[in-house]
Amino acid sequence: MFLKKDKRPNGRIFLSIVQGFRDPSTGKVKHKVVKSLGYLDELEKEFKDPIAHFKEVAKEMTKESKEATRPLTFTFPANDTIDTSFTLRKNLGFAVLSFFYHQLKIDDFFINRQRNLNIKYSLNLIFQMLVYSRVLFPCSKKQSFEKMDFFFLNFDFDLPDVYRALDYFNFYKDDLLLHIHEMVRMVYGRDMSNVYYDVTNYYFEIDMPDDFRKSGVSKEHRPNPIIQMGLLMDNSGLPITYRLFEGNTNDCETLMPVLDELKDDFGLKRIIVVADKGMNTGENIAYNILHKNGYIYSQTVRGANSEFKDFALSDEGYVQFDDGFKIKSRIVTTHIWVTNVSGKRVKVPIEQKQLVFYSPDYAKRARFERAKAVEKAKKLIKSSKNGKLSSRGSFKYIVSTPCDTRTGEFYECVDFYSIDKEKIKEEEKFDGYYAIVTSELDMPDRKILDIYRGLWRIEESFKITKSELKTRPVHVSTREHIEAHFLICFVALLLLRLLEMQTGHKYSAKTLINEMKNITGTYLDENYFIFDYFNDIVEDLGNVVGIDFSKRFVTLGEIRKIVAQTKK
């Protein structure tokens, strides 16, 4: 605050104490009269030196205004309207993401790379905007650009710059992933003794496939062209790296290329690859053995050979537990099919530990799921017309017989449909039984099982990308831009996973996102914003990143200090 001297038309000097502040909508300095004092000639009758006296008063008022306990007074006209040229409500929850973004020095990565580029816009600022938007307000790149005023950040670039930047993000993708890995390793001490791997796919709403987005086996059972994503995760559930593949690539063919990159680029020693039965092929097992890696893969019991089924169903050798759970294992010489240097498929003997366990809970779930499928099959049979089933629905438990089973007489024109009771009876024998195969011959059974159970985290990561981060629909079309889009989604996922870890895994990704979205401030006046959302979860977020989110009235200057604090 300061003393202002106004010369009026009558020639007299009028004194007032004025507060200066920067209007957030225009960026210009504005003044607000805090106290009107009167004309100088009249004040001279009361004070020896009114100007010197009231300058000291202004200093004291400035000092008092900085005290937290002082009352705040705002006056608004009753007919005040909303200024649509200025975003009154802004998000501060992104500061939590900013803490991890800058802790991993992603800003330094782009700033250093940009020194060699002849571009005026900031790659770092665009990448920040797209990552924060992907977590809090997932939408297209164009909509993210249009909504960037929702953040307490100053972004200075145009929409075309955003699309140009995508080409650079793709160009620097591999270097950035390695940089992030090194920062996670340095800051958090990444445990990569076991790495988890899984594959999912994302469909595109386009009419025809192209060289990248191709027709393949969609996990969502859609006819659209897809791309495949292979994702690697460490022992703590943090994503390590990923790779995109053409849509017609088989899941089992994606593992070796990703591991090649991981071992070469990330300089790893021996690792144990944990994956589901889709990766359990002779080629992948041979690859791990040749590269001195280990593996822990799930193994189907129902689809195994008769000798393995007999081993699983036999009570001999099981260790029983009070809750009905049981487990056993054996080490056997088994054979895998591999392609030799001549391109021929040959059988190769290997030593392998085979672990089988039975879970009453899994058995109960299998029976429940089958009962639903059987009921659906019965309805299909009942609704069939002229002995013909609709092309819709599942036929797994339906058997077609062309003749009367009692008389042997053939039906004319139509088949007779019924529930396949023999198939159900055969399946029931294996309810609750699961198997794992591994190269770790000396590892205890329960440890193998515990390691394998960690695979759920990577499945959850895929779920987060599809549901919370809304990775699709993908609103870009070139391969370079698609790659950049998934890079942004990967970084967004990693920041979320780090936040989950730092809050002790007490909250789901969805909960954390919602809480960050709710940390918003509404502009009042004189550069003050009012915040109206705080709870135990927000307090935990603040404790992790060193921010006090409990203050109700915060100046723009204080907000800028909070944001700057996350960048240290």
Image (spheres, rainbow, N blue to C red):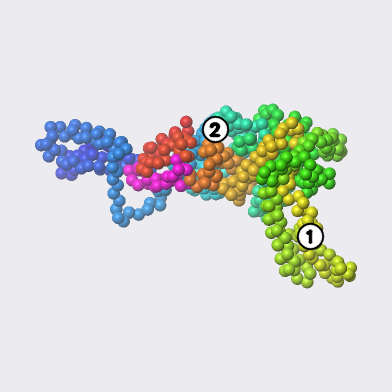
Residue 276 shows up from this direction: no
Q: Is the residue marked by circle 2 packed among few (<14), some (14-19), or many (20+) residues within 10 Å?
A: many
Asked if residue 122 is among those painted magenta in the image, a careful observer would answer no
Magenta range is: 517-539
Residue 161 lies, in percent from the top left, at 54, 42
Counting labels gives 2
Mark 1 residue element: helix
Name the residue located 73 percent from the left edge and 50 percent from the top edge.
431
Taking 189 as reference, is 357 left or right? right
Residue 567 lies, in percent from the top left, at 47, 33
Residue 136 lies, in percent from the top left, at 51, 46
Residue 373 shows up from this direction: yes
Name the residue located 72 percent from the left edge and 32 percent from the top edge.
443
Q: Quadrant of residue 19?
A: top left
Q: Outermost residue toward the right?
A: 408
Q: CA distance from mark 2 to mark 1?
A: 58 Å
Q: Outermost residue toward the front?
A: 322
Between disc 2 and disc 1, the foreground one is: 1
Mark 2 residue element: loop
Q: Nearer the viewer, residue 274 or 181?
A: 274
Q: Which residue is mark 1?
A: 421
Mark with earlier residue (2, 1): 2
Q: Is the residue marked by circle 1 packed among few (<14), some (14-19), or many (20+) residues within 10 Å?
A: few
Asked if residue 525 is among those painted magenta in the image, a careful observer would answer yes
Q: Quadrant of the N terminus?
A: top left
Taking 178 as reference, is 209 left or right? right
Vertical order, 368 against 278 (above or below): below
Q: Quadrant of residue 371?
A: bottom right
Tell me the kind of residue under disc 1: Lys
Tell me the kind of residue under disc 2: Leu
Q: Quadrant of residue 292?
A: top right
Q: Which residue is mark 2?
A: 104
